[in-house]
Image (tube, helix red, strand yellow):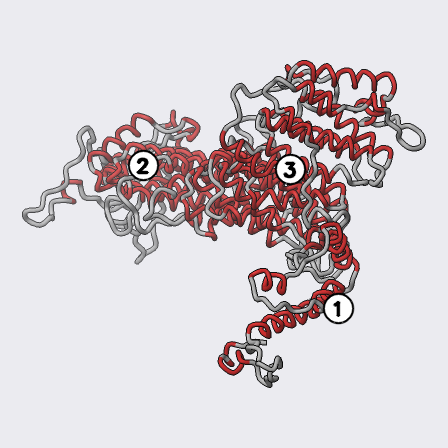
Amino acid sequence: MPGTLPRFPSMPALFGSLPRGVSSPSLPRGVTMPNLPTLPTLPSLPSFPSLPSMPRSVTMPSLPRGLSLPRAVSMPTVSLAHRRLLRDCCSVLDHQTPGGLCGCCWALRPRYKRLVDNIFPEDPEDGLVKVNMEKLTFFALSAPEKLDRIAAYLSERLTRELNRHRYGYVVIAMEALEQLLLACHCQSINLLVESFLSTLRLLLEADRPHLHILATSSFVKFANIEEDTPSYHRSYDFFVSRFSQMCHSEHEDADTRNKIRVSGIRGLQGVVRKTVDDELQVNIWEPRHMEQIVPALLVNLQQHTHTNSESPAEQTEVCFRELLCRAAYGHINNAIRPVLMHLDSHRLWEGRSFAVRCFQIIMYSIQSQHSHLVIQQLLGHLDANSRSPASVRAGIVEVLSEAAVIEATGSVGPTVLEVFNTLLRQLRQSVDYQLTGYYDNTGQHETTSAEEKTLQDSVIKTIGSFANTLPVYQRSEVMLFIMGKIPVPGIYPALGSPNAGFEGSRMIQVMLLKSLLQVSERYESSNLLMALPSSFLEPLLSFTLMEEPEIRLLVLSILTSLIDRRQNAARLHPASVTFDVSVLELKDDSCSRQDVLFMRKHAQRLYRHVYLTCKEESSGRSHYEALFTLLAVLSVELANEEVLVDLMRLVLALQELALSNHESLSVFNRCGVHAVCAASLSLLSRLGPPPPLHLHVTQVIESRQQEARHLLPHHVLCDQPSLPEGELKVDDSLLFVQSKMCEALTGSSYSSERINTPYTPQLTDEDRLSKRKSIGDVVSLQMDMDPQFCLDAQQKPPTDQITFETLKNAIDDRGGEEEEERRKRRRVVERFQTAPFEEIAAHCGAKTSSLQSRLDQVFELIIRPPPSPSGHSPPRSTPLYEMKFPDLCVY
């Protein structure tokens, strides 16, 4: 009927038409069906206006099936009617399920949805309804198969609230998801994770910083949960990228920027914790991930300081250390390579402090057995930057030095010599760059000597740092390796640059000897035979005869550091005649058998080179102080009767050298030698010889104090030496007398007869070379190539008797006196120093021809036919040995 409302059926009638065997659903306990109002009560509403009559043929549209009008409200509550009506309408729209009855009837909706809805309060500022959250948690634990639907519905609610910018309900939904994650068992957590991670992605993609922080905090809580069930399809690539981007945040507000960066760092830390120990998860060590994570951490480590525990720098260091400590053997390179790239791209090698700090964190964080991998990465990077500016190379070398100190408890790795080979190669390249003025082949990039000098000092320091990490036996190998790398013209011509010439070779020699000194300064060995083997000692002593003063000084320092096993060298400086022996650390027992064997084998060679070093005119104050220190260390370390007597003989020979007029020594050189003799004998006389010897030495020193102070070390080996004018004249009363010293030793365990024998150095071919620029000038000088000598040998008449002496003299006929032979050899040496290469080659050819002629003479004697009765032997056109053995004759 027009103008009247249709009659709705009652609730029992709604379910009365159900099929047989299907009962109507029962309501939950404590929930009753609302009473539907009767239609006759509607006209009694005072605020309801009368309905106008409808036109003919127009009927009132009917309400959808199952939809009822809202309850009438009374007049006292009309002020709240609009709010309640709006909330009821929103609830109907939010919970509606298409084509179903449960969407409009809240009581008939699934229980998990009702439980989820109950945790949201009317006002989001009230927070999560804890009582209802406990009910939801209990339901989830009781029915774990519904966890996925609960998580999906929570994610749906959160997405809806996020789209409507109702961020209070977003926070409540995330809190509910977190509590469900923490409460669920490990076996069922995978049902929640997918919805949880998709929700986090939505929050991280939003443009609200506080949502980023909220999502990161939730992810960190999730990362701390240990899972027993693996997940094969889970991916964290988005989170790695997004958290790394947050670490680079440039928000306008500084406080907000720091919070975002800290959240990004914590998020990366959570990703690492979640994935690094699970082989089934994404491989976080892949280069594509490391190239995002490591630069993001280094940026915050570089731009911030440690102000508090919440600062980005502090969080970065914690995350970086945790990342590195979890790195396995095969992951170290992937973790270190982005660090090197970051330092290169931001030019942080030149500052050095940040680069050093980064690698200190790395070396202290990784496992000690993997330390050598970091060293190898740095060495390879140093080679790759060999044509970079000197400041960059010096920064890398300094980082290497610091890393070697930290790595002292580990091992350098299997390629020990390769480490030193790389550093020595950098030294040679630096010398080349210093000489040319450019650090590239094109000549476009200039460098300065000061920059290259700084780099060279850093390399030498680094060599010493690496050597200190090695055991004793490996240090010996390293010293031999460095000694073999020292360029010697004529022996190792390829080691130096072809454009460097003699100056380049000299500079490389100095650098490598300094490196050798760094290794030897902390070398500790109880056996001198191992510390100074012949293969090392002989080439080292050869450098004492070079003209370069710096090289000789370095060699003396190296010898002293290797022999000084009780660190007495520092106590023996400066040289003095009033030295207090009590400050020295003297050995309590006698020399070991190895030390005695060493002195018997090498003592004369050591004495000889000390003697020849004193003959050098270019020696200065530091040289004489080094000579005294070497003699004093020999006295203390290898002190026995035989060694002390030999040292006294050497000192007396040095005194005679200073008095000789045949040597072209300056007044300073002669006074320096006298000062060394006085200081050495003063120390030797206090190390065990009888008191009369000390008395004689003291008397001579007192006489010098009164009459000739320039013969004492305090007045000569100082900044302003007091030297006499004109030639040096020394009275006999100011000299140490050999006869008195012999008399003082008579009756003691010291051999007085031995001291009566003057010391004469055993000169060799090498020692006769008084002045040379390198030890390579004596190569191949064992052959006598004097043309006059060869001519005399050719004119020697053949002998009739064939004996051993005949053959020996035919091949190597020396003849003449010893002095004449020395003179000839000196001429040969001088010729090799000054003659051009063509002339030397001509002499070698003459020597070969001379040897062939001598062999022909010997063969003529062998094949000479017996004499005929007439006294004449028929001439033979072809030698007998060519007739019988033609294939064995080689010309």
Q: CA distance from mark 2 to mark 3?
A: 70 Å
Q: CA distance from mark 2 to mark 1?
A: 83 Å
Task: Report which quarter residue 643 is drawn in.
Answer: top right
Task: Report which quarter residue 59 is drawn in.
Answer: bottom left
- Which amino acid, mark 1? Glu
* Residue 433 visible, this orientation: no
Query: On the image, numbered disc 2 is attached to which residue?
Result: 226
- Which amino acid, mark 2? Glu
Q: Residues within 10 Å of mark 3 (few under 14, many from 20)?
A: some
Disc 2 + disc 1, Cβ < 8 Å: no
Precedes in sequence: disc 2 or disc 1? 2
Q: CA distance from mark 3 to mark 1?
A: 37 Å
Precedes in sequence: disc 2 or disc 3? 2
Precedes in sequence: disc 3 or disc 1? 3
Disc 3 + disc 1, Cβ < 8 Å: no
Task: Report which quarter residue 108 is drawn in.
Answer: top left
Query: On the image, numbered disc 3 is attached to which residue?
Result: 606
Task: Tell me the mark number nearer the camera, choosing from 2 and 3.
Answer: 3
Q: How many marks?
A: 3
Image quarter (top left, top right, bottom left or bottom right) of the C terminus: bottom right
Task: Kindly give the residue lying farthest to the front in the view shown.
Answer: 869
Query: Helix or strand or loop: what does disc 3 sit on?
Result: helix
The picture places residue 618, in percent across and down from the top left corner, at 81, 40
Q: Residues within 10 Å of mark 1 (few under 14, many from 20)?
A: few
Closer to the camera, 267 or 92? 267
- Which amino acid, mark 3? Leu
* Picture residue at 39% right of the left edge, 36% below the top: 174
Closer to the camera, 161 or 515? 515
